[in-house]
Amino acid sequence: MSPSLPYEAILFVSFGGPEGPDDVIPFLENVLRGRNVPHERLLEVADHYQHFGGISPINAQTRDLIAAVKSELLARGVPLPVYWGNRNWHPLLPDTISQMVRDGVQSALVFVVSGYSSYSGCRQYRENLIAVQQLLGETAPRFDKIRSFFNHPDFIAANIDRMQAALQQIPVESRHAVQVAFTAHSIPTSMAGSCDYVKQLTETCGLV
């Protein structure tokens, strides 16, 4: 480890998603493992993915994000390797962390691509990391997770940039009547009632 760097690597952690029709059922089985979900319901959800060729955009978006971070690290002269592990689809988190161990990584900064706090969007990822650490024992790296970024100035600025770009597509004479609708990933009401998910979403909307 460089004396000037407290970490030896960056680890991106994401949900994962199918990248083809044959991935859909195995992916959903991973997502629903341990949950009492009827098989008929699994097939209904699988059909939704098939409308889009069995492909979720999340893996491609994560690859783009990692490529951008690698480019920025290189430009700033920060010699940190970047790893990526998913909860539900390849590259799977346990496999990625095992590779980090083989590469000699002992400490890593963790970026979870979910920006808002909820069990599935924050705490469960921490549990995933701890589970792998317990499995690997003393060889497991130390992880420090970056805070949820729902109100980070750069995240807000990125949202503003995209909104302004969308508004530019509307004729000038019609823009005064435009109303903006914010939307987000749904979570069970029982989960929403025990976390800051809705509060944080509302803050993001207000800041934007």
Image (cartoon, rainbow, N blue to C red):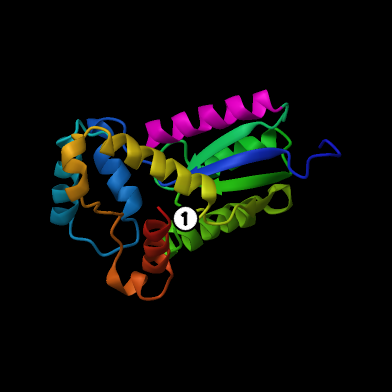
Report the residue at 45% width, 29% height from top: 64
Decide whether the magenta segment is chiefly helix, strand or loop: helix
Report the residue at 65% width, 37% height from top: 100
Q: Is residue 187 above or below residue 171?
A: below
Front in this rendered view, residue 166 or 19: 166
Q: Amino acid at mark 1?
A: Phe
The single residue placed furthest to the front in the displayed view is: 173
User: Residue 56: in sight, yes or no?
Assistant: no
Q: Is residue 45 toward the left or the right of residue 30 in the image?
A: left
Mark 1: few/some/many CA within 10 Å (<14, 14-19, 20+):
many
Residue 181 rendering spot, x and y as whole percentages: 24, 53
Q: Is residue 21 toward the left or the right of residue 47 in the image?
A: right
Q: Quadrant of residue 164?
A: top left
Report the residue at 72% width, 47% height from top: 139
Q: In the rendered structure, does residue 71 fall within the stretch colored magenta?
A: yes
Q: In the rendered structure, does residue 138 fall within the stretch colored magenta?
A: no
Q: Quadrant of residue 49?
A: top left
Residue highlighted by disc 1 = 150
The single residue placed furthest to the right in the displayed view is: 3
Residue 43 rendering spot, x and y as whole percentages: 15, 48
Report the residue at 35% width, 70% height from top: 192
User: Residue 53: in sight, yes or no?
Assistant: yes
Q: Where does the N terminus fall, quadrant-wise?
A: top right
Front in this rendered view, residue 160 or 71: 160
Residue 69 rendering spot, x and y as whole percentages: 57, 32
Q: Secondary structure at mark 1?
A: loop
Q: Is residue 122 toward the left or the right of residue 176 in the image?
A: right
Q: Which residues are magenta?
A: 58-76
Residue 120 rendering spot, x and y as whole percentages: 41, 60
Front in this rendered view, residue 90 or 112: 112
**Circle count:** 1
Q: Is residue 23 above or below residue 207?
A: above
